[in-house]
Amino acid sequence: MKIEKIRSIIEQASQAWMTGNVDAFAELFAPDGKFIVPGHSYVGVAAIKQVMSEFAATHSDVKIEIHQIIADGDHAVVEWFWQDTETQTGKQQKAEDAIVIDFQEGLISRWREYIDSQTPN
């Protein structure tokens, strides 16, 4: 896959998170795509939509800054800074995040996040 296409998909994913656009994020995945975050694995577009909807209902002010994207064939690694606010408590959360993404036929087949919320940025 071309780096331009990979970069476009990653940028679309970050915009979907920042705007809470559940459909836009889920549509980037293959029908049986996997979305994996520490402690949880979601398989399929419906499950990905559900978990993102739950997040969007309880968090706001998502900000993402992409630091770098490294791509090789149908694989990419993204490093980005993430910030959000819990709507109920007003607590801000910040994390550095590395994401390993596999693509198949122009869609995400696997998205695996390694989140560091402990190390000061």
Image: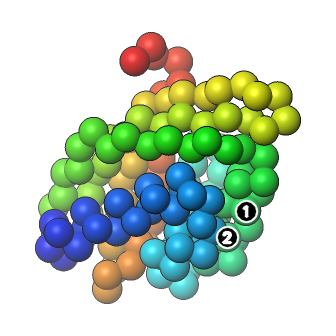
* Residue depicted at 40% across the width and 65% down the height: 12
Viewer can see residue 51: no
Residue 109 placement (x, y as % from top left) = 43, 73
The amino acid on which the numbered mark 1 sits, given as a three-letter code, is Ser
* Residue drawn at point x = 37 percent, y = 40 percent: 65
> What's the residue at 29%, 51% (across, down)?
77
Task: Tell me the number on the disc at residue 49.
Answer: 2
Nearest to the observer: residue 102 or residue 27: 27
Find residue 80 and report its image quarter. Answer: top left
Figure colour scheme: rainbow
Which residue: 26% across, 58% down?
76
Of the 4 image quadrants, the one containing the N terminus is bottom left
Discs 2, 1 touching: Cβ within 8 Å: yes
Could you tell me which secondary element the residue under label 2 belongs to? helix
Outermost residue, top direction? Answer: 120
Q: Is residue 105 above or below residue 39?
A: below
Along the horizontal axis of the image, is 68 left or right of 20?
A: left
Q: Name the residue under label 1.
A: 53
Q: Nearer the viewer, residue 22 or 19?
A: 19
